């Protein structure tokens, strides 16, 4: 339980709720980037404590600016990067249910699944 979770991009996006940490908008995986909070050009490493989810627009706008200077360009970070717990990631993943689910999964997902997947063979 004290293990640090794996550090793939999707876990960072999951920790941040698939939300850009600068503009506070939700995005799909393909529309998010992994931003170095302290830019690599300023010695920032790639790890949990220095990575946040960012949309492409905000990532480009921030560029190589140090976090302490974000206000000078009218930006702020919602949550500073941190190492999540395994439980926290599992909890966030459990809240993300696809909009369409196969009918056989419906009893297990209950009210959280919104639209059953069409399982009828196409004519």
Image (cartoon, helix red, strand yellow):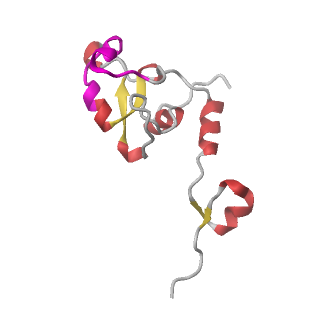
Q: With 73 as the anchor, is 111 left or right in this view?
A: right
Q: Which residue is at the front of the view, 12 or 20?
A: 20
Question: Where is residue 76, by image quadrant?
Answer: top left
Q: Residue at x 36, y 44 (%)?
A: 31
Report whether 93 appears left or right of 67: right
Tell me residue 106's x, y (percent): 69, 63
- Answer above or below: position of 11 versus 84: below
Q: Position of residue 32 (x, y in %)?
A: 38, 40
Q: Is residue 21 magenta?
A: no
Residue at the spot x=62%, y=44% of the render?
Answer: 95
Above or below, 21 against 50 in this view is: below
Q: Is residue 89 left or right of residue 65?
A: right
> Which residue does the image show at 37% across and 21% down from the upper left?
37
Q: Residue at x 63, y 38 (%)?
A: 90
Please state, as top left, top right, bottom left or bottom right, where the N terminus lies in the image: top right
Q: Start and end of the magenta stretch?
A: 60-77
């Amino acid at each position: 339980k004290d293990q640090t979770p794996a550090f793939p991009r999707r876990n960072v996006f999951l920790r941040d709720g698939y939300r850009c940490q600068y503009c506070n908008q939700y995005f799909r995986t393909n529309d998010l980037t992994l931003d170095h909070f302290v830019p690599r050009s300023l010695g920032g490493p790639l790890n949990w404590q220095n990575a946040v989810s960012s949309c492409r627009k905000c990532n480009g706008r921030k560029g190589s600016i140090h976090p302490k200077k974000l206000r000078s360009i009218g930006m702020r970070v919602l949550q500073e990067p941190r190492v999540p717990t395994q439980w926290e990631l599992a909890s966030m993943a459990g809240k993300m249910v696809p909009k369409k689910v196969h009918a056989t999964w419906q009893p297990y997902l209950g009210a959280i699944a919104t639209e059953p997947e069409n399982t009828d063979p196409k004519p």
